[in-house]
Amino acid sequence: MSQRALHSWLIVALLFVSYLYVLPRWSDWNQNSRLNLVLAVVDDGTVSIDRYVANTGDYALYNGRTYTDKPPGLSFLAIPFYLVLSPVLDHPAIATRAQSLGDGAAMSTTLNEEGSGLREDKVHYALVQYLMTVIVVALPAAILGALLFLAMRGSGLSPIPAALTTIAYGLGTAAAPYAGNFYSHQLVATLLFGAFCVAWRPWEQAQNTATPPRAGWASGVLCGLLLGWAVISEYPSVLPGAVIGLYALWRQGWRWLPALLLGGIIPGALLITYDLVAFGTPWPIGYAHSALWQDQHQTGFMSLTYPRPESLWGLAFSPFRGLFIRAPWLLLALPGFMLWWRSGRLRAEWWVTMLAVITMYLFYGSSIMWWGGFAAGPRYIVPLIPFLALGAGWAVERAFARTTTRVATTGLIVLSVILTWTEATSGQLFPPDDNRNPWLAYVVPAWQQGDIARNLGMALGLQGALSLLPLVVFVSLGLILLFLSLRQTRPRWPALVPTGHRNRSAEG
């Protein structure tokens, strides 16, 4: 196995175990609404969630029946996996084992005293939620880590700064909590960045190929499929998706157009079919029939007006949902993009990365519901974070030239990891939206009371903050192994994009 492959797999393993360690929130309306559609299709043969709607307030009411009001892409992806696993989960031995774990003393301390307890149906639902999250959210999110690492290596960054930036992204941003819950935001981040990498193919530049071969037709179909699935999972991703699609045509040529269209048609056809069955129209209008939030959805165009200063500030710097408050290391993206531009290299990729960040940031800065309800950080803009991290990698590379800046940068990343996981593991729900400073009103009190999110450590009998100890040990050992391996790698690959490259990647 090559060093590049070894490092990539170590990153995937480290992130994957971290993401599956903390269990998805059990009483989360958003997650339940998406999972209800999976259960309805497989168990009931319908797209109506009538049988499950009591567990969520995020639903659409149409012609006397209830449906999820969420984009269905994440649910569609989980359906075939649940179809295969459903008979196994129904086996009495599995159900008995799951019930015994739920009845453990450590897990029981997390239950609401006024609730109905862990009934068999609740345990089954929680098990399905966990497995679907692991398969269709956590695993793709871990693979995204490898793609980000390869993208930075393909950009010419040294091994250790590239790996450190990747770990900072995977564990020290809002990517971490949303990679372990049945939301679509982190999946969309993987789909968009994956499509970008399929078109770019940084791993071929990482091999110092002067003229990387043109990607095949199948790669074009894959790129279109990833972009299309991103759109049906979160509709606003059409904005960065369009940027990436145009880049793919520029990078690979117009011969890719039929392939991109073919790949995009597949998820598009699924969405149209679903909307026709559920709402009698080919247009995605679930939010238009939401039982709740109608005042917000009817403001402007589905809650969209124009970029507001308070929203833009709130998404970036507010204690309420600010991205940089929770992940201050991402501020390195500002000098990072400047360093990247001054290098004169990969200008097309620079523009794609910048536009992906800007389009999503301005879009959600135009929403009157920019904070996203109960959330650990700014969940709406999670899909733009890997693009921001790619730019930050250039500043991390520069910082490693001196001992003082290297130590300061590493310290900033460690602080971001601590802040991210402190908020992500506080309580049994993500911080609510009824207080503008969730740290003082929710996060700190939860930790003081030992109210730590359910996790695999509790299945071992560990309680409170102690239940996170196995995760800390695993991550520490994994990081040691990764960076010891990286120290054996040459400090930098040679110039990767010669002047005059036929794809113009290095031209100003």
Image (spheres, rainbow, N blue to C red):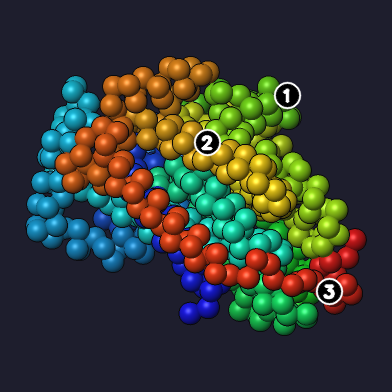
Q: Which amino acid does label 3 sit on?
A: Pro
User: How busy is the neighbourhood of tag 3: few (under 14 within 10 Å), some, or many (20 plus)?
Assistant: some
Looking at the image, which residue is at 72% across and 77% down?
208
Q: In this view, does 197 lie above or below 75?
A: below
In this figure, which residue is indicated by the disc labeled 3?
498
Query: Which of pointers 1 and 2 lies earlier in the amino acid sequence?
Result: 1
Q: What element carries label 3?
A: loop
Between 432 and 150, the one nearer to me in the picture? 150
Please give left or right for residue 203 compared with residue 350 in the image: left
In this figure, which residue is indicated by the disc labeled 1?
309
Q: Residue 415 carries which label?
A: 2
Query: Which of pointers 3 and 1 lies earlier in the amino acid sequence?
Result: 1
Residue 278 in view here: no
Please give left or right for residue 306 compared with residue 170 in the image: right
Residue 9 in view here: yes
Where's residue 13, x and y in %? 41, 61
Pair 2/3: label in front: 2
Where's residue 143, x and y in %? 49, 62
Pair 1/2: label in front: 2
Q: Which residue lies furthest to the front in this view?
A: 403
Query: Which of pointers 2 and 3 lies earlier in the amino acid sequence?
Result: 2
Looking at the image, which residue is at 66% across and 81% down?
216
